[in-house]
Image (tube, coloured by chain):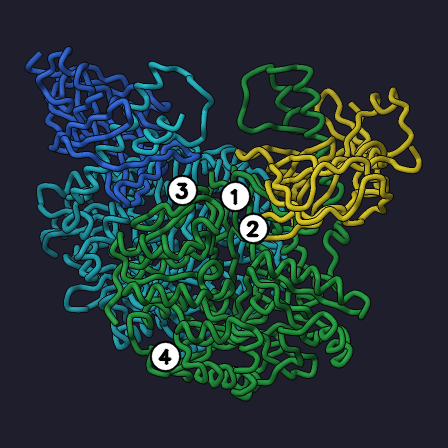
Chain colours: A blue, B yellow, C cyan, D green
Amino acid sequence: MKYITTIGDEQLTIDINHAGEITVNGEIINIEMLQMQDTTMYSVIIDGESHDVRMNEGDGVYVVELSGEIFEVVVEDERTRRLAGLKAGPGAATGEVIIKAPMPGVVVEICVIEGQEVEQGDIVVILESMKMQNEFKAPRAGQVHIVRVAAGDKVDQNTIMLTITDGATD
Amino acid sequence: MKYITTIGDEQLTIDINHAGEITVNGEIINIEMLQMQDTTMYSVIIDGESHDVRMNEGDGVYVVELSGEIFEVVVEDERTRRLAGLKAGPGAATGEVIIKAPMPGVVVEICVIEGQEVEQGDIVVILESMKMQNEFKAPRAGQVHIVRVAAGDKVDQNTIMLTITDGATD
Amino acid sequence: MPMLKKILVANRGEIAVRIVRACQELGYDAVAVYSEADRMAPHVRMAQQAYPIGPSQATESYLRGDKIIDVAKKSGADGIHPGYGFLAENADFAEAVMDAGLAWIGPPPIAIRLMGDKVVARETMAAAGVPLVPGTDENLTDDELLAAAEQMGYPVLVKAAAGGGGKGMRNVYRPEDLTEAIRTARREAKASFGDDRVYLEKFIENARHIEIQILGDEYGNVIHLGERECSIQRRHQKLIEEAPSPVVDEALRQKMGAIAVEAAKAVNYHSAGTMEFVLDKDKNFYFLEMNTRLQVEHPVTEMVTGVDIVKEMLRIASGRKLRYEQSDIQVKGWSIECRILAEDPRTNFMPSIGRIIGLTTPTGPGVRVDSGIYFGFEITPYYDSMMAKLIVLGETRGEAVLRMRRALEEFRITGVTTIVPLHSQLMNSARFQAGAIDTMFLERHFKFNQKSNPEHTRIAAVAATLVAHQRKQQAILLHQGGASPWRLYGRREALDRRLR
Amino acid sequence: MPMLKKILVANRGEIAVRIVRACQELGYDAVAVYSEADRMAPHVRMAQQAYPIGPSQATESYLRGDKIIDVAKKSGADGIHPGYGFLAENADFAEAVMDAGLAWIGPPPIAIRLMGDKVVARETMAAAGVPLVPGTDENLTDDELLAAAEQMGYPVLVKAAAGGGGKGMRNVYRPEDLTEAIRTARREAKASFGDDRVYLEKFIENARHIEIQILGDEYGNVIHLGERECSIQRRHQKLIEEAPSPVVDEALRQKMGAIAVEAAKAVNYHSAGTMEFVLDKDKNFYFLEMNTRLQVEHPVTEMVTGVDIVKEMLRIASGRKLRYEQSDIQVKGWSIECRILAEDPRTNFMPSIGRIIGLTTPTGPGVRVDSGIYFGFEITPYYDSMMAKLIVLGETRGEAVLRMRRALEEFRITGVTTIVPLHSQLMNSARFQAGAIDTMFLERHFKFNQKSNPEHTRIAAVAATLVAHQRKQQAILLHQGGASPWRLYGRREALDRRLR
């Protein structure tokens, strides 16, 4: 099976055939990868080089940790990609963004109002948890759609605090 | 429910009533016991004293490790015990004893022959494993019933090497 | 003062574990207290006795001095060690402990009180001849603060009068940002300390955070244990500490040490304490504040001096004379500490919670871990995010950095996100390796995940692709064959198939 | 000799990990080799490169010098460290390594050869003026051995000429037991070394095992790093080691040290090595044998001298001059090591195998663990049972014993049976605490699980009963309600029910 794998601004074509042989951009590699007991760690030996690799997956993105470096990787199989006729890369930002509380806490401040245009990186909400005030930033530019919480609210884990839509382009 | 618990040469009557109240020989104790992730360890707080307790169970005997001491404990509920009309303590030695290889290895020597009388503690077989020669002793007096292996044999884990029966009293 | 035999540890996490260990190694019993969230915490399991003191919120448990003193009496403890944070710098609690006939394993309450109010502390230190950073009083209006800032010149630092731990602290570079900074600092100070008083200090640029550890007994003997450098900070909270400092030579050490000892004597200090200074690029130093307690970073000093600070605190509280004179204290080797936080370095240090489902702790020569977690423990949202401290000792700073790098590589925590990768990248930073650090290092001179090894990029891509491929195969084949604890890929898988 | 940059580690387990760490801390790359059973072993995961060398049996992998040298060439390694065991004392292998143009990180092959045959070693040492235990030649018939035993007087020790690690060794107290002892010793020696020659030594009763660590460079400089006491043994294998020894004073240390240095110089020794002695109750000492390699117990010497022996071996093999003179070596503090074996102390040290499904490693001040296991790792029957070494450093022996006791209490290994409880009981033994030990201590003066705290007995009984009760309830109720990771009993359970 052929995969198009995107990491940073690079794209690799990785082919895994029925015999288990693996090529990267057409070049055969010799790799052995075994999973550990704690399920997010793998021991990888690639052409004699040994690495421990941590892998977490969420929303279709693999977050890979290796020797203290962190990579975000998106894997698409070629057929699906062709059928979907996708032109944009998988990282392109469209649709609604939901800002959830990653843990229980108290909302300190809502820095935006509904309908407001925000730039990527603008602080939208501040949540106090684990004795710290944590700032949540807009992951991309857009328009604040719904604000569901107010300053002083106690929130549970995964409470939706606000949403951002494509804004002007909608 | 009422239990007769034997530990060393002591017997305790332990009662756990429907409200979860626990008495030991009639005396109420205040105990909280929580299991750890690795399932053989428990955190016990008993009348304010905190202990980590390891518990393994096999053949009806609980092996309890606490502050570097190891205890073997047999628990019987009173009704079962009464119904069975048992007089002998649970540690009494009757029936056939099976000596198994606890791990793969090579049989170095069989020190007894079939039909031989053995005393408790007599060496019956020597197995080499993990670079060591391990002596297996008769857990109680009796007669060697069947010898299933010979010197030089490779054995797998749990291979039955020999059995000892009650011998003369049979 | 009676000999101590049973110590109540009024804290949780790694510092409670640290104190329980010291008690056990002195042959004392330790009594733990715990909130509902902490029933399975390591300090509870390791102590000889353990008592619940209330709900998970610290205000209902670890901050409830009354309950803690009750447990001390009930359990027969004869002293209380407060650790750091919670009640450690609460003079009223220290007095209540002593009023209850228990030993307070810390400094005299009057010293805590004098140093607790940052502005009073500055006045006390100035009177003792200690150089200060220019700063204001804490009872000024916002307008007065603005005028004072204009006077001392930007940048300035807004600080909470009751502060500590970076709470209620803001850097301000331009006059137009000051009003907003004062507002948010007051809000944070109010929330953290119930006291919204703030004051201004001149912010010294390219400065290093250097602190002097002191130790004194009840008979007026005070010594210092050299300096620590704590310039690697984020949000004014220390992330990495080391001893000695790359820029402090023996002459400067003795000079700063002598001043710290004099200052401690001026307030009749005993037990352990720390004088914090900023050191500018011309090696002028200015008093910042005094921490009247054990500090998070005390292990680096222990590693290079061989003095066990926690045991000394226990001995001092038993009424013993200090076992060391100043001339006994030699700094040997180099120690670095990395704080291991449950936070995500990719998302501006967002905290992380969850159960630890995999844990490998680094060990081996020269490595020490002071930890408050174990396999199966759950990180809850109720307390701060520090899970453990990784401390190394090397012959030289170079060896310490290499040793820290390998120890970080060995530290495997699964179940929560940690800042271990940030520390690894810091150890690989040429600027950090050269010791060219200051308190703005993380913000100005370091970028997380800046560049990567192209070979690592390729491996990460292939590894993710293999996992995606395997999931796809599993989805198609469902549970074909027995589940194996290890899954194999690539060449070996191919080989296995041919052999079948 | 070229500068080393990449080292192949021809070993497994904790010692391979130890050497990989030393390489990483010197900035060298490490190359691991592994058998089929060890694909997931920690040394494989931690090294920069890793190559398979064959099936699980050591004879097919770790003892295959040819394959290991091939990997060294293929991987571009420039030196080989053999650790201990396997090929460490194989002079032919050492020569083959050097013939292949690689650095041998160990002593000269000629020294290995001289000391490898125990009888030749005795002769060499006698010539160098080192006192010997009375003993025989190794080419005697059984009858000649019987006569020799009669001559020297019982008890005697039967030892393998090619021996080490207690293999092929037997104590004999009565003439009538000697023939059988010779027979079994020959059998074991044949199986372990392929050489059934044995010899006799006078067995010195109430003796201590004292050894001297030496370190030498290629330029004739040799120093000693003081003594280790290794008297706590079972089946002639060390279980606990310490440095210094409770009975060796500075004068005796210098005397034994000087003799060890002279003896090493007599065979042009360089790298690390150890002279083993017995010390009788009148403090007379006799040479036993020399180990021409790194030893299991080297960490206790590192802890009290501050010398990193593995790094020094690497530096010496790079052709560097020794960095220390004898006067630089100071013994400071007290260190104890406990070997953590996968064996059952209740069943005469029967080995245990299985997967590690729970692991908490002790840490904190003064604690070092050199380990070859991690959570999820499988202990296989192919290699020896040593999983890890727990090492502590204290200011005094008393502090070291208390620290070891608390560290053992913290060590939680689930999945295999370990001798941790034996060590705990040893640390609690008054006789051990007093340092009144000798090589027969375990057999004569200590009984495992001898007596127990009555309170602990009661807790063990109640805990087992609660578990039995809960199983019974589960059997009745089946899966009533959701499964919780923690199960609660007793009072709290009662309370919960009332609240529902």
User: Is C337 positioned to the left or the right of A61 in the image?
Assistant: right
Tag 4 and tag 1, C-beta contact below 8 Å: no
Tell which subunit mark 1 falls on. D
Sooner in the amino-acid sequence: mark 2 or mark 1: 1
Pointers 2 and 1 within a single chain: yes
Tell which subunit mark 4 falls on. D
Tag 2 and tag 1, C-beta contact below 8 Å: yes
Pointers 1 and 3 within a single chain: yes
User: Is B37 positioned to the left or the right of C467 in the image?
Assistant: right
Tell which subunit mark 2 falls on. D
Residue C49 position (above or below residue A149):
below
Q: Nearer the viewer, mark 3 or mark 4?
A: 3
Sooner in the amino-acid sequence: mark 4 or mark 2: 4
Does dot 2 land on a helix, a strand or a loop?
loop
The three-letter code of the residue at mark 4 reads Tyr
The residue located at (75%, 35%) in the rendering is: B98
User: Is C4 positioned to the left or the right of B27 in the image?
Assistant: left
Where does the C terminus of chain D fall, quadrant-wise?
Answer: top right
The residue located at (85%, 36%) in the rendering is: B92
Marks 3/4: CA–CA distance: 39 Å
The three-letter code of the residue at mark 2 reads Ser
User: For residue C479, which quarter of the picture?
Assistant: top left
The three-letter code of the residue at mark 3 reads Arg
Marks 2/3: CA–CA distance: 18 Å
The three-letter code of the residue at mark 1 reads Ile
The residue located at (36%, 15%) in the rendering is: C477
Q: Disc 1 marks which residue?
A: D379
